[in-house]
Image: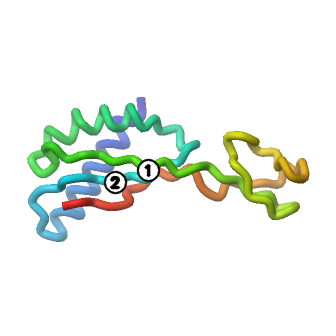
């Protein structure tokens, strides 16, 4: 379960940002998690609750998760398509010359105070 390690990094970054701006308590952290990022949102929120409540600045702080859909781009025909549904092979032209445009994110979108 790498979600606990991710939570420790989130906490570190949130605390640093809060301290830089003179914030004493954070109410919520909003995360963007890509559909194919390998992060399990339910595990992340469970780990968050356990770890955040150990920090005075984060006691009761909610972790909100936005799931970013995975989208792949085909270099041959220019099609953009849902990655999970079709994988690496373009459903329009059958090309394997594709790459992921979005859906692998694990990022802090905002911190609510």
* Label 2 with label 1: CB-CB less than 8 Å: yes
Expressed as whole percent of the image width and height from the top left, the position of residue 82 reads 69, 48
For the view shown, which residue lies furthest in the right direction?
Answer: 93
Left or right of 16 in this view: 103: right
Return the residue nearer the eye: 25 or 97: 25
The residue that label 1 is drawn on is: 66
Say the numbered circle drawn on residue 30.
2
Residue nearest the observer in this picture, 83 or 104: 83
Instruction: Identify which residue is drawn at 51% across, 52% down.
Output: 105
Secondary structure, mark 2, is strand
Residue at x-position 73% and y-position 52% = 81
Q: Residue at x 88, y 51 (%)?
A: 95
Horizontal side, residue 65 vs residue 90: left or right: left
Of the numbered discs 2 and 1, the one sitting upstream in the chain is 2
Which of the colour schemes (rainbow, by chain, secondary structure, one colour) is used?
rainbow
Name the residue at 89% across, 48% down. Answer: 94
Estimate how packed mark 1 is, as few (under 14), some (14 to 19) or many (20 or more) residues with alpha carbons within 10 Å. few
Q: Quadrant of the C terminus?
A: bottom left
Assign the N terminus to one quadrant of the image: top left
Percent of width and height locating residue 88: 77, 45
Tag shown at residue 107: none
Q: Position of residue 93 (x, y in %)?
A: 90, 52
Quarter where residue 46 is shown: top left
Element under disc 1 = strand
Q: Residues within 10 Å of mark 2 (few under 14, many from 20)?
A: some
**Left or right, residue 56 beside residue 29:** left
All told, the count of numbered labels is 2
Give the spatial CA distance, label 2 vs label 1: 7 Å
């Amino acid at each position: 379960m790498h979600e606990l390690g991710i939570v420790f990094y989130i906490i570190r970054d949130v605390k640093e940002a809060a301290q830089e701006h003179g914030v004493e308590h954070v109410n919520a952290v909003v995360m963007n998690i890509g559909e194919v990022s390998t992060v399990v949102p339910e595990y992340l929120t469970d780990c968050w609750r356990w770890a955040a409540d150990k920090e005075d600045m984060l006691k009761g702080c909610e972790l909100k998760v936005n799931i970013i859909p995975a989208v792949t781009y085909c270099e041959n025909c220019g099609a953009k398509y849902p990655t999970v549904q079709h994988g690496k092979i373009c459903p329009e032209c059958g090309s394997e010359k594709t790459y992921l445009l979005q859906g692998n994110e694990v990022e802090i979108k905002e911190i609510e105070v």
